[in-house]
Amino acid sequence: MKMLRVARREYLERVRKKTFLIGTILGPVLMGAAILVPGLIFELSPEKQKSVAVIDSTGSIFKEFSEALSDTLESGTPLFKLRNVQFTQEDMDVTRRSLAMEVESDVIDGYIVIPKDIVEEGSATFYGKRVGDVKSLERIESALSTAVSARRLSGEGMDYGQIRRLLRNVELETIQLHKGEERKGEFLLVYFTTFIFIMMLYFTILFWGVAVMRSIVEEKNNRVIEVLLSSLRSFDLMGGKILGVGSVGLTQYAIWAAFALSLSFYGLSTGMLNQYVTFSWVTIVFFVVYYVLGFMFYSTIFASIGSVCNTDQEAQQLQVPVSMCLVFTLIIPMAILRSPDGSFATVVSMIPFFTPIVMFMRINILMPPIWQVALSIAILLGSIYISGMLAAKIFRIGILMYGKRPSLPEILKWLRRAKT
């Protein structure tokens, strides 16, 4: 079959390129690095004790502040080494200049100025050389807030410790019910896993769809396409290119899946991987299904764009509206997350431009009725056929047209006249 011959040519041409090998190898390397490197960095860069000087203008809040800031390192050593600076109002400027010099020379990590009116105004200032440690600064802020709140309540004749015990938070545990089973604490893992998969769908559908478009533009400029069309139908040529490039994407996925499987053995043995991701074979099956259908649908559109353009610059301009449809699916996850079986999620998942990513998202978060899944697949298949036929008609004429890019009315005339 001529279509399969074209597909074989496209497939072999791409998998033999060094760029494919480099991209395929680099993908799992980056994936593994994203999972393992943060843990290694944390192990190699343990948290260190921080020395902080405190200028307490109130003269009485330092004790409560230091008691509230009781964090410790793994060894049991206090995380914050606080020093109460003795000063007078006359030599305040001299004291601050001295502390600034200690900060500059790394003797201390910073100093805090607590003003006299902190109880009324609720504001203090931290001076430091390195102010990017947000976690430590938030902890200092929380401890200072605790000390000030205790002082305010004490001024009203109330005991802060007793009130804190009475107002302690209630922890709400979530358990998802699914087919008579209780799933405890898995929702965030499911969402994180879903996000990883939809990002993979987004990038691969876009990347390989654009690859089809660029392949057509390149062959059009080389005039190779004229020879090919003399011996086969435009629909066969289109289908062959789509199948060939799509198979390259599946090959890349297969290699990545083998790497992920080996990585999962390590993750399960150490308990690291199951803290971050969770998925089943159902997830993998639907991921492949919606990748194939999504790629075929978008690649027919990208093929149409490539056939009417003469340069990559022209093609990039026309592909923006199509790419924005994929971008839209990355904007709405929170709406889908709040109500995966709601009207909005259901309607959007049936629109072919959004179906591959949105329906997969719904399946992974909360399995919709089987009829909706089947309907979405049927809609995609129908859309692929219609877009493929239209694309082949545009392709048949556009691929042989050079010079000025055709206008929309001209393209509509092609659709009425062309045969595939």
Image: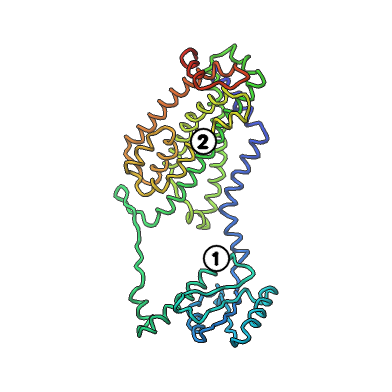
Instruction: Name which residue type carries label 1.
Output: Val
Relative to 148, residue 239 above or below: above
**Number of the label disc, if any, that sits on residue 134:** 1
Do we see residue 86 in this rendering?
A: no
Q: Mark 2 is on which residue type?
A: Ser
The first of marks 1 and 2 along the sequence is 1
Using residue 163 as the reference point, say whether residue 7 is left or right of it: right
Left-right relation of 184 to 261: left
- Image coordinates for residue 228, horizontal then vertical, percent: 61, 15
SS class, disc 2? helix
Q: Position of residue 202 (x, y in %)?
A: 50, 39
Q: Give the residue at x 36% y 41%.
A: 345
Count of residue discs:
2
Most foreground residue, 27 or 334: 334
For disc 2, the neighbor class at 10 Å (few under 14, some 14 to 19, many from 20) is some
The residue to which callout 2 is attached is: 323
Mark 1 burial class by Cα count in 10 Å: few <14, some 14-19, many 20+: few
101 in relation to 218, above or below: below
Examine the image and state in which quarter residue 93 appears. Answer: bottom right
